[in-house]
Amino acid sequence: MVEKKVKCPKCGNINTISGDPGEVVKITCSSCGNPGKVTFKPIVTDGDTVIEVFDLRKEYGDLVAVNNVSFSVKKGEVLAFLGPNGAGKTTTVEMIESIRVPTAGTIKILGKDVSTSFDEVKEQIGILPQEFFSYERLTVRETLRYFASLYKNPANIDEIIDAMNLKDQEKKLYMNLSGGLKQRVGVAISLVNEPDIIFLDEPSTGLDPKARREVWEVIADLRNKGKTVFLTTHYMEEAEYLADRIIIIHKGKIIAEGTLDELISKHGDESILRIKNCKSTHTLNVLKDKEFDAYAEGNGDIAVKIKYKEQILEILSLLKYECVDYGTIDIRRSNLEEIFLKLTGAKLREAG
Amino acid sequence: MNLKFIKTDLVLGVRAWLRSKGTVFWTILFPVLLIMIFGAIFSGADEVKYDLALQDLDDSSDSQNLTRLLEESGFFKLKIIGNDTDISTYMEDNDLAVGLQIPEDFGKKLDELMGNPTAKLNLTYYIDPTDSTVPNIVRGIISGIVNGYNDMITLSPSIVSIEEETILGEDFDYIDFFVPGMIGFTIMTSMVYGSIERNTKLRKDGILRKMLTMPVTRYEWIFSKMLFMLFLSFISTFVIMVVGIVVWGLNIQINIFFFIIVICTSFMFSGLGMIIGRFVKDQETADMAGGAITFPMMFLAGTFFPLDQMPTFLQSIAQVLPLYYVNEGLRNAMIYANLEKTLYFTGFVVVFAVVFFLIGVFLTKWKED
C-alpha cells in the first residue's frame, strides 16, 4: 500500500490517498467534494529485478528528506546512488535496509516487502552501514567469526579472509588497522553470509586516495563475482569507476538515472578535442573551412566540439596533412560533476 | 534463541574485555585498591592510636582502673585533663575529635549499684561532630573496653555504659561494613557505564544499525550482553570477597539472597544505563550523566559510611536510592546474617531491578527516526 498526496484541481486542497502500485483509486476532495481518479504508477520490473522501490518518501516534520523516489536494481549490477551530503542517499538506503521507517512508499527486496517480511531476506543481504566501526578489541578473524555466528549458513571465514586479501591482518586488532583496512574488514563483514545483495553506504568516505582505491578494488571484485551491489557515494569518480548504472539524487529527488554513457549523452555537453600549443595560425581557419565547430582559446590552444567520434579521426588526418606543429592532443568528455552542475546549478561536493 | 551467537558474543566479549587494561583496572583492581586503602585505614586499629581527651572527675581507684584499661588497650594516646579545665574547650583548642569524662563519685556510685542488674552508670562521651569517622570508630572501641571493665568488676556486665549507642556492632569491623558496599558500588558503576557504552558508542559506530539488518532479535542481543555483564559482576564480586577474606579475615556467608541481589543489581543498573543512553545520545555526555547519578548515590546510599552519621534529611534521601537497598541487602545477607532484614532489602532490590530493566529495555531501540 502506497500513500500519495494529491492536489485538488478545483480548490487546491491537498488530499492524502492510499493505493497499491498499478491501482486506480476514486477520490473525492475532502474540502470541495470534487470527484476524481488517482492512478498509482505500477512498478515496472523484470525477472532479474532484486530491489524495487516505489514512491518512497521520508518526512521529518516539515522537511522532506526523500521525496517520492522510485527505482529498481537488477541482479548482478552495481548501482551507484550518487548525491552530495544531505541529498537523501543514506536515508533512502537505510529505509531499504529497514533501519528507518518510511513515511510512505513500498520497498521490495527479492520480491519481499521489507515493511512486513524483512526478516525473511536478512540471510540474503549484506550491509556495510555508513561510518561503521566494529569492536575495537577483536582481531579481524574474531570479528568475522562474531558476525558469522548470527547466520544459519555462514560463509567460510578463511575463504573471505583470502578473498579480501586480509590474511596478513587476520590476527591484528580492529583498532590497530588503517582506515582503508577497516573499511575492507567492513565489506568482509557484509559478506559473512554469502549474500546475494550487498549494500555499501559511502564505503570510501574519509579515506585517503590510496585507501579509497583499495576499497574500489574490493568492490570491483564483488562486481566481477556477479554480486548485486547497491553503492551510495558522493564521489563521482567512484560512481564512474564502479557503477553499471548511476542514480543521481539531489534534495531528496532523483534527478537523473542511467549508465554513465546514457547520462553523458543525455545531459552532458559535447566532447571537446583540444589541440594544445598549436604553432600554425591557419589551422583554425582550415578546421572552420571543413565546418568543424572550432575556436581559439587564447593560450595557443584550439578547441573543437566533437559531435560524433568519426570527427576525431578526420581532425587527426587533417593535422597530419597540414603538417601542423602542436604540443599534444587532449580529448575530454563531460563527467558526472559537470552533469550534476548542469542539472542542479551546484557542484557535487559543495551541494547539500 | 540463537545460542551459537550468544555463546560467541559472551566468549569474544570476555576476550575483548581482558584486552582492555583500563576497563579491567576499573572493574577489578580499582575496587581492590579501595578495599586495601580503606581497610588499612579503618581496620588496622591495633596499629593506629587515637587521641582521646580524658577527664577523671572522680580520681578514685575505680576510675583509675578504667583509665588504666583505656591506656593498656593500645588504641589511645590519652590526654589527661585536670578537673578545673572545660573538656569541650580543651578538645577544641587541641583539635581533638573525641573525649571521655568519668563523672564525680564514679567509684562511690559503682559500689552502690553493684549487684543491681538494672542499674546504669554513665560516662560522658564528647565528640567533634565535624569529624565523620574517628568518633564512630572510637565509640566502638570504648564500648568494647567498657564491657571488658564491666566483666572485670561484676558478673553483671551492664552497670557502666556510655550514653551513646555504638554504630558498628561490636562483633563487626569497618571492613565488614565496607566490603558489601564496595561490591554494590562496583556492580553499579560497571553496569551503568557498560550499558551506556552499548547504547551510545555502539550506536555511533553503526554496530546497532548493523545488528538491525542481521538475523538477531533485540532481546537475544540484550540477553547475550546481560550474560556478559553478569560475568563482570560476579568476577568483580569474587575478587573483592577474596581480598576481604584473605587480607582482612572477613567472615562472609554465601547464600541464595547474595546471588539474587548480585544478579538483580546487575539488571537494575544495566536498566539505568539504558535509560540514560536513550536520552543522552553522545557517549561523553552520557558518561557525565551516569557520573552525576552514580557518584552522589555512592555517598548517599551508605557505601563507605553508615547512614546514621548523616544528617536526617540525607538519610531520608537514601531511602529512595536503589544502591542503599543493594548495600544493606548485601550486608545483611553476607555479613550480619539477619534473615528478616535480608528479605526486606532483597525484596526492594528485586522490585527496583524489574522496574529499571523493563523501562530500559522498553526505551532501547535500534531503529533510527
Image (spheres, rainbow, N blue to C red):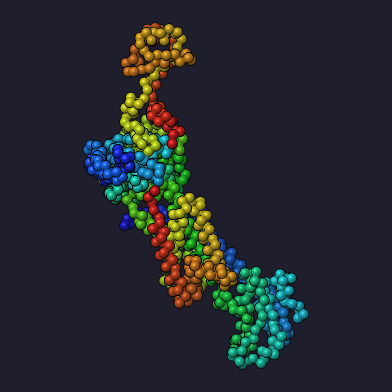
| Image x and y of residue A66, in percent | 36, 40
Position of A231 with respect to B53 (left or right) is: left
Residue furthest out toward the right: B84
Q: Is residue B2 above or below residue B157?
A: above
> Residue at the location (40% across, 46% down)?
A61
| Image x and y of residue A254, in percent | 35, 35
**Residue B72 visible in the displayed image:** no
> Residue at the location (39% across, 58% down)?
B361
Quadrant of image for the C terminus of chain A: top left
Q: Is residue B59 above or below residue B253?
A: below
> Residue at the location (56% across, 68% down)?
B314
| Image x and y of residue B3, in percent | 33, 57
Which of the pair B3/A41 is nearer the observer? A41
Position of A97 with respect to B338 (left or right) is: left
**Residue A6 visible in the displayed image:** yes
Which of the pair B150/A15 is nearer the observer? A15
> Residue at the location (45% across, 15% down)?
A297
| Image x and y of residue B287, in percent | 50, 54
Query: Within the image, what quadrant is residue A53 found in?
Result: top left
Q: Is residue A285 above or below residue A156?
A: above
